[in-house]
Amino acid sequence: MNIVVGISGGIAAYKAPMLVRLLIKAGHQVKCCCTEHALQFVTELTLETVSQNKVYTDLFSRANDHTTEHISLKDWADAMVVAPATANIIGKLASGIADDALSTLLVSMRKPLFLCPAMNTQMLECPSVVRNIEYLSSIGVHMIEAEEGELACGTSGKGRMAEPESIVAQMQQILTPRKAIKVLVTAGPTYERIDAVRFVGNFSTGKMGFALAEELASRGIEVTLVAGPTHLNISHPLVERIDVESARQMYEACTERFPQCQAAILSAAVADFRPAEVSDIKIKKQNDTDGMTINMVQNPDILATLGKMKKDNQRLVGFALETNNEIAHAQAKLNRKNLDFIVLNSLQDKGAGFGYDTNKVTILHRDGTITEGSLKSKRQVASDIADALEQSLTL
Ligand code: CTP
């Protein structure tokens, strides 16, 4: 979506660049429109850099693309958010006053509009501000309520602008039309305990699975994300995150939830083996010379299990990480695990695989077609996989 971020002159303007970044990360295009006072708190250069677009501040600037810049922005936008929204800008919009770029744009905007009030508690409680907020809510403006906390004036109370993560989540909730589809996604590594302080793991970071969850949710698809240990965050109202540690925990979570889903995409790097015995206490060295042997047993294969559970109206997608004979191995995996398609990563490709922000995959379909991709961001790869899934769900 195209989103205009309006910024008015309050201290919370320092959070606006983070809001812009999060909106872009969620897959949106962003342009910023500021009041002159906003630029006392955040620089034009910062906003231009994070949004990768020029910043609109002046209705009459000779550098504008159009003489009626506010009209062009209202046509470009699919939605607009003002963060922070001061008492002043709220009052202007409620009264139809248009005397600078931001207020003029707001008065002409006919797309979903979100305001994030941020001001001192007494200002927020001022009867005319209360009336303005109530009036704007009554005509369909979405208010993202200010939160309680420490305020810039040194007092504490209601008036802090909502955090950028919360603003984005509340916007997505309203802006994303929901589809009646639920998809299970697995992501990240699994850790298999050896003793109280050690585990066997792998280098997966979960980036591909998290990008998939974000992409599907941005299309209005409900996602159950079962994640192994990872530092990644995700905040989308359509994503339910379930954190697990081991392959067996991931297996339990997936087999329990798959029957309620239309599809599953298993991108996790699940440990094939786990230590046969786990010590509750830290294993000590016996002497100065002896090594240590760990007996490993096989973990359940989640993908193969879901392949057996799969009903005709469900779709199942797996990943294959191969180093040699890639296509043949992936094809065999597709058949063996009863998949609809398989996403093949080759470790021979530079920039693909664990830890990178990019990936290069080949998709092998059940009917024998093979789609070879180029090196793309993980989010773009996620979009290709989501396209393939949505298409396969219509068959
Ligand atoms: N997978 C799984 N559960 C496991 C192991 C793997 O769900 N215990 C899933 C992965 O999430 C991935 C796919 O299976 O989608 C590919 O796993 P991989 O380890 O490459 O396949 P294997 O069948 O284990 O084959 P091999 O290790 O022999 O290559």
Image (cartoon, rainbow, N blue to C red):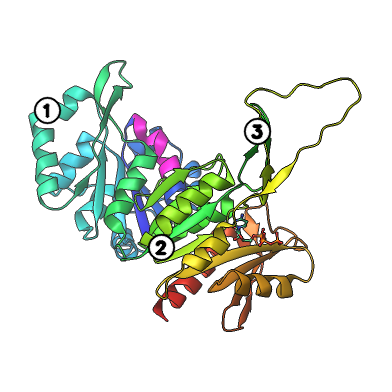
Left or right, 341 with reference to 198: left
Residue 221 coordinates in the image, percent (x, y)? 37, 62
For the point 69% across and 23% down, which residue is it? 282
Q: Nearer the viewer, mark 1 or mark 3?
A: 3
**Residue assigned mark 1:** 126
Residue 20 coordinates in the image, percent (x, y)? 43, 47
Labels 2 and 1: the sequence-earlier one: 2
Whether disc 1's CB lies below 8 Å from ligand 1 is answered no
**Residue assigned mark 3:** 278
Q: How crowded is mark 2: few (under 14 residues within 10 Å), some or many (20 or more)?
A: few
Left or right, 327 with reference to 259: right
Q: Nearer the viewer, residue 30 or 188?
A: 188
Left or right, 128 with reference to 87: left
Secondary structure of the residue carrying numbered label 2? loop
Q: In this view, does 298 lie above or below 285?
A: below
Cβ atoms at labels 2 and 3 below 8 Å apart? no
Q: Nearer the viewer, mark 2 or mark 3?
A: 3
Dominant SS in magenta? helix
Amino acid type at mark 3: Val
Labels 2 and 3: the sequence-earlier one: 2
Labels 1 and 3: the sequence-earlier one: 1
For the point 24% across and 52% down, which residue is it? 113
Residue 63, numbered circle: none
Magenta-colored span: 11-19
**Residue assigned mark 2:** 65
Secondary structure of the residue carrying numbered label 3? loop
